[in-house]
Amino acid sequence: MRGVVDRGGLRAHLLDARLAGVVATAREVSLRSYRLFAARDPRVLIGIDPQGEWGQRDLLGLMAERCGVSADPRDTSGQDVIDPDRTLAALDSFADRLAAVAERRAPVFLGTGHPHRLLGFYVALAEALSAAGCAVLTPAQGRSVDITTRFGLRTHNLDYVRGVALVREPAAGHAGGEPGAHTHSPLPVRAALAAAAQAGGPLPELVIGDHGWLCGAGQLGFAAIGPADTDDPAPFVGEAEGSVSVAVPLDDAVRSEYYRPLTRYVLNRACLSR
């Protein structure tokens, strides 16, 4: 799949790799997330402060519209479904945002809560944007952030891998070692952007990320784009309410190499291929 950049080939790849179509995310897991979001559980809000009521049925309708999941509340088991055409349309919008920021040579910030899966995707974007003349910002490297996890409050350190922000647990060893920790928290992006502001800028014109990196930046008023799975309603609520610029529906936890055709497609559409 290395050479896939055309729309038809990418659509087939989305289905073959289960990035879209029938995905690994269980319907029960998604419905639980919608219930928690409706209850305003911060673990699921991941940085979004919703303006609307967003009950469970509202969320189910939104996710059916934005992702293509079943809108039937009686459908409570099995695997979720993502409409590949919705993914493609969102990828086009994603790429158009990249093209616009590259044309202005504006500063950007990238961060991921899925470093084991998505780090390569973001690194390729960071390198392409840097080559186009965009400053890839890396504020607050080494800053400690206390994040609530299922094991309680844990301290993480903000780090960067080839321009992409992530967090590591101190016990993981030296910076640049293991890929980083999985997190949904918006606290790391808040710390990074606050540090950039305190230093007198520059501030990013575009934030590219997932989970709390995407939602936390969008809630602060930054243009923010990134991927989101069917069990993460927050980015799609943010998009519907205007705090998130683009949320791309796809499975965010498949093998890292499966994202390479998406990278080639968006860089090609954004005229950033080298």
Image: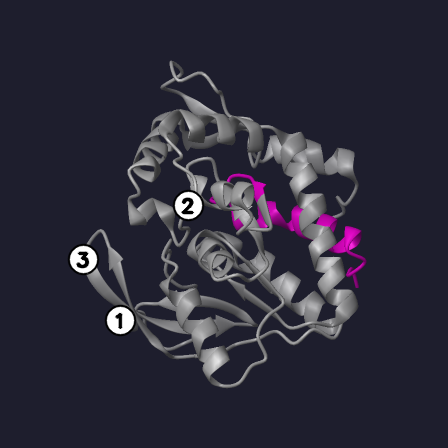
Q: Is residue 269 magenta?
A: yes
Q: Is residue 61 left or right of residue 174?
A: right
Residue 8, image quadrant: top right
Which residue, given by chain and number where applicable, does mark 3 sit on? Answer: 152
Q: Earlier in the sequence, mark 2 or mark 3?
A: 2
Residue 50's disc number: 2
Question: Looking at the picture, which amino acid does disc 3 mark?
Answer: Gly
Residue range highlighted in magenta: 248-274
Callout 3: few (<14), some (14-19), or many (20+) C-alpha neighbours within 10 Å?
few
Q: Nearer the viewer, mark 2 or mark 3?
A: 2
Residue situated in front as seen by the camera: 77 or 37: 37
Which residue, given by chain and number where applicable, does mark 1 sit on? Answer: 171
Question: Looking at the picture, which amino acid does disc 2 mark?
Answer: Pro
Q: Nearer the viewer, mark 2 or mark 1?
A: 2
Q: Mark 3 and mark 1 in contact (Cβ < 8 Å)?
A: no
Indicate the secondary structure of the residue bearing disc 1: helix
Q: Mark 1 and mark 2 in contact (Cβ < 8 Å)?
A: no
The percent coordinates of residue 232 (x first, y second) are: 43, 41
Quadrant where the C terminus sits is: bottom right
